[in-house]
Amino acid sequence: MLINGQVGQSISIRDRGLLYGDGVFRTLRAQRGIALHQNLHLQKIQQDCAKLGIHCPALSHLEHELAGLLVQHPNAIIKLIITRGIAQRGYAASADGEPTHLWDVSELPVYPAQNYTLGIALRICELRLSQQPRLAGIKHLNRLENVLAANEPHAAKFAEGLLLDAQGNVIEAIRSNVFIVQSGVLLTPDLTQCGVAGVQRDRVIAYAAQHAMPLQIRTISLAEVLAADEVFLVNSVLGLWSVRECGNRHWHDFAMAQKLAALFEQERGL
Amino acid sequence: MLINGQVGQSISIRDRGLLYGDGVFRTLRAQRGIALHQNLHLQKIQQDCAKLGIHCPALSHLEHELAGLLVQHPNAIIKLIITRGIAQRGYAASADGEPTHLWDVSELPVYPAQNYTLGIALRICELRLSQQPRLAGIKHLNRLENVLAANEPHAAKFAEGLLLDAQGNVIEAIRSNVFIVQSGVLLTPDLTQCGVAGVQRDRVIAYAAQHAMPLQIRTISLAEVLAADEVFLVNSVLGLWSVRECGNRHWHDFAMAQKLAALFEQERGL
């Protein structure tokens, strides 16, 4: 673990990251000494810092630190957190505040192999996401909604949980982004009111554009998800999982997801 | 500063309080060795822990630690934070997780004397609070909305900022609760969809009940606030401030607020 460039494992109890969740993060998957999509992750965290008015350390500085970590931990999950730094008392930030940036390393998780072949069972969460356009899309440290959703009864029996907003539209899953296939068209929820815009979501969108595959970003109802030809989830740690079951619906054909999964799996070395 | 009973000033970067804002807090004002409304604060933090499923340390344990702090810091601001503790990776909490509880002490702030005599200028924040009934009322660590509101342009020129929800109803101020007086009736916003229910708000509500003063807790529009006979703010650090100015409206009569302020000021030793 590296905190503002120093080896350590703790931060001040006056850090605004703790006091207010006043910070952002990204989780990278490192394999054979390479942090997958490192550039996309670092760009995203820079953008998220800018949206919150947090001074992000220079890209070259982050790249340098990450390179050092990859030598020591070539196969690992590497999390980067950037907070607004130490607080004076009160919500207002001082203009000259120094951000805190830290890296944490943990072991690569092992998921059941069948998640990649047979797909997963997706639960519909009871919690409904709140709508806050000022925070939507940002991977910030205010994650109590995800915590509550992940701790709902029976959550442990399912690989993931689907999150809807108060209007009943599908936004994302607890720790991944959602895509559906409707008559050959890829769709993913609009995230201008809530949700986290992940790097892998961007990659699927970019891939579709490059290969002239029709893709829409728009409001998607739960009924549309349950009626879709395919449903799949993406995130930077797990890659891509097709959904084989949600509510009373079962899926058996994962053609489109498999096509995209080839992309993900190839570079993940699976 | 006291962290899980030990003197210190830092917590693990794997604490869920930092990673997810997965915790709650209370800010107490200590005067002459007494933490004002200590019992109310400790009851509230216990209730907030219960709502989030966080194991709260025993009341007697918290009281014992606080008593020790008050000997060293008889006049101070004392903040208590309780988090869900150290995380495994991921949003799901382990059932046997040990909470983190910590105390931080800072100096009593000095506010302009006229805030208590002439009232304050209240800004209307641009940010609109999101609605999340599962978190409403709880003083939790997901406070990015307050941070964004406190950092809006011109915020520093005003003593406080009024927060509305997406429907334009008044909920609270950035760090205080709001009351208005309408033809002799006290009103305060309903906090079942968003907002923090502070100890001083509870005290005003209890005082009104004890003295047979009519009081309503309900949806309150911005127009009602601007048309009110009086508007005042309460919190545990500042006590009670009347509003003398908000938008184009000016107030000069603070009769009801002064009656209640006598209560607050008496015990604050002003």
Image: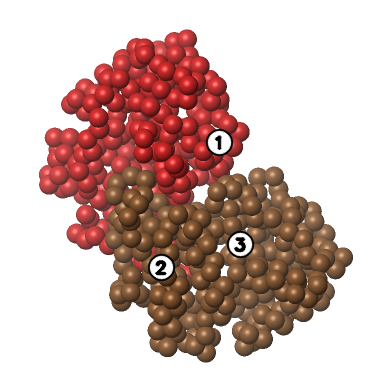
Chain colours: A brown, B red
Residue A46: x and y, percent? 49, 65
Residue under the image location 40 percent in, 75 percent down: A61
| Mark 2 Cα shell of 10 Å, populated few (<14), some (14-19), many (≥20) | some
**Mark sitting on residue B165:** 1
Depth-wise, is mark 1 or mark 2 nearer the camera?
A: 2
Image-based side of A247 in relation to B68, left or right: right
Q: Which secondary structure, mark 1? A: strand
Return the residue at label 3: A197
Quarter containing the N terminus of chain B: bottom left
Q: Which secondary structure, mark 2? A: loop
- Does residue A106 show up? no
Q: Quadrant of residue B102?
A: bottom left
Residue B177: x and y, percent? 41, 31
- Does residue A188 show up? yes
Return the residue at label 2: A57
Residue under the image location 27 percent in, 20 percent down: B117
Distance from disc 2 to disc 3, alpha carbons, whole Å, reads: 21 Å
| Mark 1 Cα shell of 10 Å, populated few (<14), some (14-19), many (≥20) | some
Q: Do pointers 1 and 3 mark residues of a single chain?
A: no
Three-letter amino acid code of the residue under disc 1? Asp
Residue under mark 3: which chain is it in?
Answer: A
Distance from disc 1 to disc 3, alpha carbons, whole Å, reads: 24 Å
Three-letter amino acid code of the residue under disc 3? Ala
Quarter containing the C terminus of chain B: top left
Q: Quadrant of residue B269?
A: top left
Q: Quadrant of residue A243?
A: bottom right
**Mark sitting on residue A243:** none
- Camera-side residue: A3 or B45? A3
Residue B75: x and y, percent? 16, 39
Q: Give above or below for A31 relative to A235.
A: below
Spot the residue most to the top. Answer: B183
Image-based side of A48 in relation to A61, left or right: right
